[in-house]
Image (cartoon, rainbow, N blue to C red):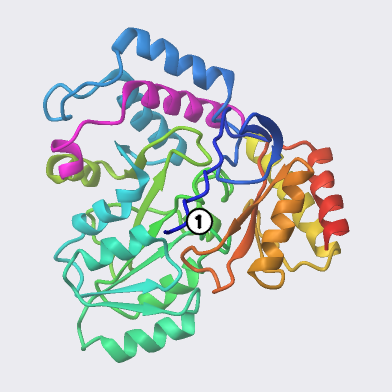
Amino acid sequence: MPHPTPPKPIMQSPPGATTVIDGRRYVYFVGTGYLGLQGREEVIRAACEATEQYGIGSATSRTGYGNTPPVLDVERRAAEWLGLDDAFFFMSGYVGINILVQAAAGTFDAIFVDEASHYCVMEAARATGRPVWSFRHCDVDDLRTVLHKQLEPGERPLVLTDGVFAARGDVAPLAQYDRLLADYPGSALGVDDAHGVGVIGERGRGTFEYAGMFDARINTDQRPGDLPRLFLCGTMSKAVGGYGGIIPGRQVFIDRLKRTSPYYAGTSPPPVPVAAATAEALRLIAADPDLRARLHRNVDLLKRGLSRLGLPTDDTPVPIACLTIGDAKNMQRIRDELLRQGIVVAYMAAYSGLPAEGALRLAVFATHAEAMIERLLDALQKIL
């Protein structure tokens, strides 16, 4: 007989610097709640008040009577924060890159995908029916080689990538891709920035801003001369602390998405409580830029501490540290010992972009106190 699957841990509080799991409160360095907004009182209150006023959901698509004030508030506040004309808010960030690729149909001849990209990026590429080629992770030279080898003269490439990679925390070299693609007329660069929006860039607008590329080419129907077009999608479920996908852009582009996308016309929008919570979280982000400043201070504290322990990390403001320490058994031992000490980190046995032995993934939030980070570092030093 097969062995029964062991029970999965159950989270019994909002994710945050401390989180209740299976009845015990832990210091929590897992997941994606980077700004610590999932449990903010204002966010929860907004969801409760919207539920009382509007119910759970519209029960119809947005082409009918599915537009509610909270859904429209998300789009307005996201567009204002990101400095674009409008935005499209939909059920899940997972489908964002799919929506963008559908919107770009007919404007590209082949797709080139970073081999470590999230599953949703790979799915979106394959669903087009166009040729799909992968290139080595964050390797501009390999992308150049693959483009030269696979494209016929005059063919238009679409390059797809994560902005910030979910498990490893590395940042795609978008500016280098942009310069390379300038040699291919009609080319485009599409970025799923689920882990970048709200986290990096001067105003938290994500990986394009971090690369100095948050410009008029993003999500527009205008042709940018000889420069590549830029496509961007994000999620509200991670740094923002709500839920659902977001595509911000120029007015004509967003209007076209809403006319043509089945995710607008063929399904209900995100539930009203979710939309109200998301809109309130966006308000808090716009009103308090120190949220990101606190996050970046904690990122610096964690990564400098890991470096002192001889554990290699990058120097970016991304709140993810990916550690490979020996084999899978050793990393499971480290995770389990930390758990016994009341500290939760993730051992990921398999995920897009990880080596065969997996990795320990540490995530730090704006809400972690310095003492919590030092406690993690002290515990790691003794366990190692």
Classify mark 1: residues with Cα within 10 Å, few (<14), some (14-19) or many (20+): many
Q: Is residue 217 visible?
A: no
At label 1, the amino acid type is Thr
Task: State the residue in front, 52 or 327.
Answer: 327
Query: Residue 266 in magenta?
Result: yes
- The image position of residue 227, as x and y in percent, is 33, 69
Q: Is residue 252 above or below residue 102?
A: above
| Residue position marked by numbered label 1 in the rendering | 207
Determine the residue positioned at 75% across, 49% down. 338
Quadrant containing the C terminus is bottom right
- The image position of residue 241, as x and y in percent, is 51, 34
Task: State the residue in front, 227 or 142.
Answer: 142
Determine the residue positioned at 42% across, 26% down. 279
Q: Where are the magenta residues, as a range?
A: 262-288
Query: Residue 51 in magenta?
Result: no
Q: Is residue 72 left or right of residue 154?
A: right
Q: Is residue 54 left or right of residue 297?
A: left
